[in-house]
């Protein structure tokens, strides 16, 4: 048996980061927000309940708009060697 791979993702400490959240018909939740990925830089974090979460097709335009807003708040940091 091999040890699981763990990736550390740190959410940017913004008092009101842009985010998208949705609860599906089964009560499973989805959260998308800004993140700072160690050794990589700005990014987006997706978090769901263990069962995952479904988003209806009718909600996709709103999800895409929120993703754009989340991405636009992120400014790439200068990489250091």
Image: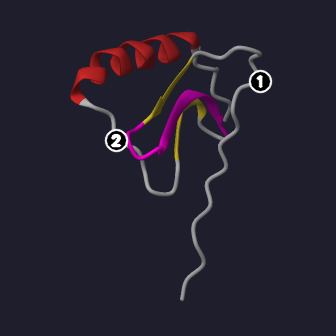
Quick check: 33 left or right of 30?
right
Which residue is label 2 attached to? 54
Determine whether 40 is above or below 61 in the image: below
Q: Residue 64 appears in which quarter of the rendering?
A: top left
Q: Secondary structure at mark 2?
A: loop
Whole-percent x, y for residue 30 in the image: 49, 37
Q: Which mark is residue 76?
A: none
Q: Is residue 36 magenta?
A: yes
Quick check: 15 left or right of 60?
right
Identify the magenta region.
24-38
Q: Nearer the viewer, mark 2 or mark 1?
A: 2
Name the residue rendered at 37%, 12% in the picture.
Answer: 65
Image quadrant occupied by the N terminus: bottom right
Image quadrant occupied by the C terminus: top right
Q: Residue furthest bottom?
A: 1
* Magenta segment, prevailing SS (helix, strand or loop): strand
Determine whether 6 is above or below 75 in the image: below
Q: According to the image, what is the colour scheme of the structure? A: secondary structure
Q: Residue 61 appears in which quarter of the rendering?
A: top left
Which residue is label 1 attached to? 13
Q: Is residue 66 magenta?
A: no
Q: Secondary structure at mark 1?
A: loop
80, 59: nearer the viewer: 59
Whole-percent x, y for residue 74 in the image: 57, 16
Determine whether 8 is above or below 68 in the image: below
If you read the primary sequence from the N terminus, does the residue marked by circle 2 or circle 1 appear first? 1
Using the numbered discs, state the Cα–Cα distance from disc 2 to disc 1 in whole angstroms: 27 Å
Name the residue rendered at 70%, 14% in the picture.
Answer: 16
Whole-percent x, y for residue 43 in the image: 55, 29
């Amino acid at each position: 048996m091999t040890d699981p791979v763990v990736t550390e993702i740190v959410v940017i400490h913004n008092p009101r980061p842009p985010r998208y959240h949705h609860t599906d018909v089964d009560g499973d939740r989805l959260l998308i927000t800004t993140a700072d990925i160690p050794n990589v830089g700005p990014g987006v974090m997706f978090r769901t309940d263990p069962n995952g979460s479904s988003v209806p097709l009718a909600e996709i335009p709103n999800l895409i708009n929120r993703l754009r807003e989340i991405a636009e708040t992120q400014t790439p940091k200068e990489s250091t060697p």
